[in-house]
Image (cartoon, rainbow, N blue to C red):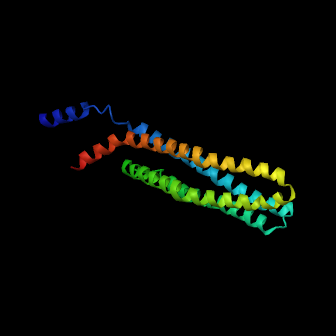
Amino acid sequence: MDNLNELKAIWHSAGTPNLPAPSEMKRMVKSFQTERVRKKWMVIILSTLIAAFMFGTMIWSGSKMVSTWLGGTLIATACMLLAVDNWRSLKRFNQLDNCSNREFWAFIDRTRENQLRYYKKTQLRIMSLSVTGLILYLYEPATRRPLYTGVLFAVTVIYWLLMWFVVRPRLFAKNAAKLNRIKEHYQKLAQQFEGDEE
């Protein structure tokens, strides 16, 4: 019986200063989930509003050229693709409510894979649709007021180039670094899991 009591005493006195406390882990998971869900909802709402605004603008402005309708439709389609992509991702984040540490670890890995897929494929499609749509949409005003539309078109092209070559890579790096920090924080916990399984 003394051996059992000694083992219990040793077990309870063993320090785990490098591992996060359960309350801290729950707080971090909840914070991560809340932040991401809020951003996803903002993107869904704003992209849906922009799509509705595009259709409303085309209807009320009395656009006569097919290029304007096609351009507006492409822009609205890009917005809806963005909303749908975020909606699908939102479902995954809502499953984080009652997850184990291993499930959260797998979730972080899956989020990282989705981030790469979004950066390499989805964002490319959405940006291509919206830029093509904008060029087609501005064609009708360009026939009426070439100078005004030329300046607007130049500003738009500069904006898209800055977004594509400056802002987009920086945001990707920032989001990747944030996921890496979370992953490193839980790396110690995963190593403990692996040690327990052996």
> Residue 130: which quarter of the image?
bottom right
Residue 60 drawn at (x, y percent): 85, 61
The front one of 80 and 156 is 156
The front one of 83 and 93 is 83
The residue located at (41%, 51%) in the rendering is 109
Q: Is residue 64 left or right of residue 28?
A: right
In this view, 31 is above or below 92 = above
Q: How many marks?
A: 0
Q: Quadrant of the N terminus?
A: top left
In the rendered image, is residue 123 in sight?
yes
The front one of 192 and 152 is 152
In this view, 188 is above or below 73 = above
Q: Is residue 71 left or right of residue 65?
A: left
In the rendered image, is residue 94 in sight?
no
In this view, 175 is above or below 95 = above
The residue located at (43%, 52%) in the rendering is 107
Residue 108 drawn at (x, y percent): 43, 49
Residue 66 drawn at (x, y percent): 79, 69
Residue 114 drawn at (x, y percent): 48, 55
